[in-house]
Image (spheres, rainbow, N blue to C red):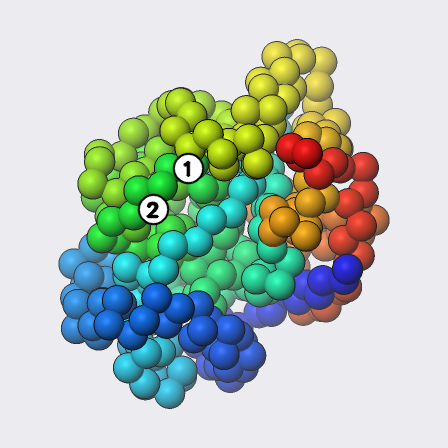
Amino acid sequence: MYLTFSSIHEDKPGEKWQQLFHRHWPSYRRWYLSEGYSNRSGYLTCRNAIREFMPALLPVYHQLVELAGGGDVESRFLSLYNPPRYIFACTQLGWTRGEIALVRNYDYHPKLCEGVFLYTNWLRPVIGMSDCCWGLLDGMNDAGLAVSLTFGGRKIVGPGFGSPLVLRYICETCTTTEEACAALARIPVHMAYNVTIIDAAGALSTVFLCPGKPALVTTSTISTNHQQEIEWEDFARMSATMERYECLQKILGDATLTLPRVIRKFQDAPIFNSCYSRGFGTLYTSIYHTVQLEAKLLWPNKSMRQSFDCFTEDTITVKLNGGKGSSLAK
């Protein structure tokens, strides 16, 4: 199985973003309407939610809606307010020993990944992995604030935003981990997520988010697919969330490990997952160096390095053969 990843630089929303949207819109439209047209919030509700909770993004939202054609479904989808539920795995770790970095594996179905590493300057320079055309799965801004997300392992769904748009908002408007945590505490999300944040000074937090509950800010440097305890046993078994979490704990307990050695362990089982047929294979490893303002995408046999000072548009194709990973729970 092969997957294509592209790096795209476009400071303001324009032709490149429009092409990205139209390329993915048929699939996103099917997903967005999969539970029926009437089950999605109306346009005014969606727009007003952005205005209330993420007002700085409202002008960008209007620009993107216009580029997308201005249609009702497109407008509601781009708000990412009360979208259908979606579940991914993922593993993330904040590192502060000698170097400051955020390392994460993104585990999802290969056919549902945009594969676009996007450099924008909408409100400020931001580099990150695109999702839902303007959200972020992980990313970093020019202040050296890096964020990434994992699914929180809970079935609950409630009123709120899809987390990729919340990550975009953080990167566009925050400069420190403290500011990012404050934003997460007031923005509602529609599902349970774990967000790990690290800034250029090495301040690090993992925030547990859940609909209808206050955000829980922790000092944990690691996150897989549960929060304080296992609530969804079947998913926990299938995703091997505890096995990956315990592996990360062991990594952190080894005082001899350096960041390069930690990154190599993200290419090994159980952190690296080759169960692509079940929709939870590792699609990439991302590393954000918050001091150097550099980002790297890594696969078993290929890599892509980018920075704010030197960002090159490129396209590479990777073979998802699992590397040295495992298929998680058998």
Residue for point 37% across, 87% down? 69
Marks 2 and 1 close (CB-CB < 8 Å) = yes
Amino acid type at mark 2: Met
Q: For residue 287, which quarter of the picture?
A: top right
Q: Residue 329's x, y, as percent?
A: 64, 33
Residue closer to the observer: 106 or 178: 106
* Residue placed under numbered mark 1 in the picture: 152
Q: Residue 240's x, y, as percent?
A: 58, 31
* Residue placed under numbered mark 2 in the picture: 191
Vertical placement of residue 289 versus 77, above or below: above
Residue for point 71% across, 13% down? 256
| Relative to 212, 129 lies left or right | right
Q: Residue 145's x, y, as percent?
A: 45, 43
Residue for point 47% across, 56% down? 136
Whichever of labels 2 and 1 marks the residue nearer the N terminus, that label is 1
Amino acid type at mark 1: Gly
Vertical placement of residue 269 versus 155, above or below: above
The residue carrying pointer 1 sits among few (fewer than 14), some (14 to 19) or many (20 or more) residues within 10 Å by Cα, namely many
Q: CA distance from mark 2 to mark 1?
A: 8 Å
| Rendered-image quadrant of the N terminus | bottom right
Check disc 2 and report its element: helix, strand or loop. Answer: loop
Q: Residue 157's x, y, as percent?
A: 29, 47
Residue for point 35% across, 33% down? 208
Q: For residue 60, which quarter of the picture?
A: bottom left
